[in-house]
Image (cartoon, rainbow, N blue to C red):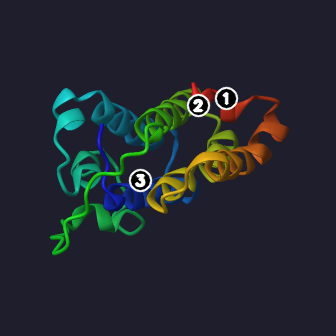
Amino acid sequence: MLFSKYDLYDLYAVINAARRVGDASFHKNLFAALDAMFLDEVNAIISESNRIRIALREVPGIDRESFGFVFTSNRYVYAQGPVTHPLCSRVLENAVRELSRCAESGNAERLSDLCAALCRIPLFFAEGMRGVRLRLAMRRACAPFSRKYGEQLYRAIRR
């Protein structure tokens, strides 16, 4: 799946807002909608503007105050090309799957911690990080969650 920088900023905003808002059923629906977007083969080929926003508009119980940006379609004057980092799609898809699994478990504290760990990952790709700098940034972002829960989050999203 190809992402523009704008998609990555939207994904960051969604994960960050999910830390503070919603109950277990809302989080299940939110991350299931994102997961479905990754699985949609049309999205894998076409880089459409506002794709994340459009995917989330139909989520039942979405908080219009915290997720208000989802209901605004942006018209971009400057068309950004897709982010071409080879890990971008795979890492983000795995991150959303981890969030979806965690939302299914219903553990609100764990989900909040996972959102805190993963929300910056899209920004690393949007900023064009590569190589050692990218790996180090992702490890640092995942480290507090991994220490608290004894899981190798970095390995889970890199696979």
Res. 103 mark: none
Give coordinates of residue 40: x percent, y percent: 23, 29
In the image, residue 33 sits, relative to residue 134, either above or below, namely above
Q: Are marks 2 and 1 in contact (CB under 8 Å)?
A: yes
SS at badge 2: helix
- Image quadrant where one finds the C terminus: top right
- Few, some or many residues within 10 Å of mark 1 (<14, 14–19, 20+): few
Label whose residue precedes the other's in the sequence (3 or 1):
3
Residue underneath mark 3: 11
Q: Residue at x 28, y 36 (%)?
A: 37
Give coordinates of residue 148: x percent, y percent: 83, 40
- Few, some or many residues within 10 Å of mark 3 (<14, 14–19, 20+): many
In the image, residue 38 sits, relative to residue 88, either above or below, namely above
In space, the residues marked 2 and 3 are separated at their CA atoms by 18 Å
Give coordinates of residue 87: x percent, y percent: 48, 37
Label whose residue precedes the other's in the sequence (2 or 3):
3
Q: Could you tell me the amino acid type at mark 3?
A: Leu
Q: Could you tell me the amino acid type at mark 1?
A: Arg
In space, the residues marked 3 and 1 are separated at their CA atoms by 21 Å
In the rendered image, the residue lying farthest to the top is 159
In space, the residues marked 2 and 1 are separated at their CA atoms by 5 Å
Residue underneath mark 2: 158
SS at badge 3: helix
- Few, some or many residues within 10 Å of mark 2 (<14, 14–19, 20+): some
In terms of depth relative to the viewer, which is nearer, 55 or 126? 126
Q: Could you tell me the amino acid type at mark 2?
A: Arg
Residue underneath mark 1: 155
